[in-house]
Image: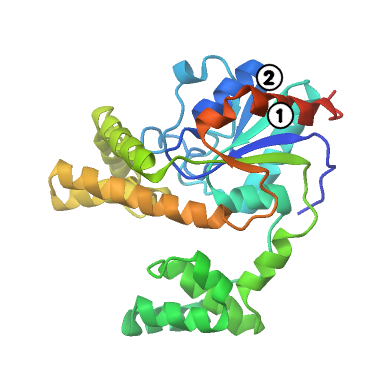
Amino acid sequence: MSEVTPDPRILVLAGPTGVGKTACALALARRLDGELIGADSVQVYRGFDIGSSKPTAAELGGVPHHLIDIREPTELLDAAGYAGLADRAIADVARRGKLPIVVGGTGLWLRALLRGLVQVPAVDHALRGRLEAEWDEAGSSVMHARLQAVDPLSAARIHPNDKLRVVRALEVHAQTGQPLGAARREHALGAPRYLSLIYVLDLPQPEHRQRVTERVRAMLEAGFVQEVAGLLAQYGPGLRPLGSVGYKQLIEHLQQGTPRTEAETAIARATLIYARRQRTWWSTDPSIHSRVTPAELDSAARLEEITSFFRTSSRR
């Protein structure tokens, strides 16, 4: 991935799902003449609307939001591809004299944009197959303990039940003899690709839990089940974005006939687990300027902080 000139400066709003990042970004965009650049690995796909909390035209209220609805669900986008698209969107926004506001919770995509990607070996399918077979035989706790022994940094970041990421970290260690976690830590301290002001938004856990519960219920009332049924009918269950939180649980609901109340509880639980993983992702990043609640970000002091940061920018 190529280097990017430090200017234009960008504002980044990251953090766990369901804390109100998009609403905060829209409020700032209206006050500061900005435009949004999405960093959400589900909102990029057309048809994945309710379950990804994709903002509607009415919610956007005329504020341009780049990098949503840019791909068919069969046209997969990875972190490197996202970073290239985001680079072009940021340059376009800044060239028109607007403030680029990057908003989203997909940590790897944001890392690719802000720092580039860690160079790791290509997938060794034979090795991966052996590790997956060992996982199936030995179980998650044994494999996570093995990762802890050779790569404690990755083990601390990866949930013990996350088969894909545990296996990948073990695969990289087997290929290189080096822990993937150490490479990522070194990489995180490298030169940034942008001058950025990064806020991680979050809420007290009881408030966040209540907000997630209410959001899931509102999604279901808005037609989330019908959305998933339509995607299943069009694409089948093997589509990768259908493995995302919420979509996965509703597929099980539709295929197994479980009560909707059970599906609602399962989605809320999976959302909170995902949020914990997002918090872990951002917990050690040295480039974060501040961790704030949405109310704190809306304060006069924070607004002055943001405007001061961009006042010295070479925006044109």
Q: Residue furthest front?
A: 301
Q: In this view, does 134 lie to the left or right of 13?
A: left
> Looking at this view, is 277 or 232 the one in front?
277
Q: What residue type is labelled 2?
A: Leu
Q: In this view, does 35 lie to the left or right of 152?
A: right
The percent position of residue 184, horizontal first and vertical second, equals 66, 65
Contact flag, marks 2 and 1 (Cβ < 8 Å): yes
Q: Which residue is drawn at 12% across and 45% down?
A: 259
Its colouring scheme is rainbow
- Residue 169: image quadrant is bottom right
The percent position of residue 24, horizontal first and vertical second, equals 54, 27
Q: Is residue 195 above or below residue 1?
A: above
Q: In this view, does 312 lie above or below 252?
A: above
The percent position of residue 232, horizontal first and vertical second, equals 30, 44
> Looking at this view, is 121 or 314 the one in front?
314
The percent position of residue 189, horizontal first and vertical second, equals 74, 60
**Residues at marks 2 and 1, CA–CA distance in whole angstroms:** 9 Å
Q: Residue at x 83, y 42 (%)?
A: 6
- Quadrant where the N terminus lies? bottom right
> Looking at this view, is 222 or 297 the one in front?
297
Q: Can residue 124 be seen in this view?
A: no
Q: Mark 1 points at which residue?
A: 306
Q: Can residue 198 be seen in this view?
A: yes
Which label is found at residue 32?
2
Q: Is residue 68 above or below residue 33?
A: below
- Quadrant where the C terminus lies? top right
Q: What element carries label 2?
A: helix
Q: In this view, does 217 lie to the left or right of 306?
A: left
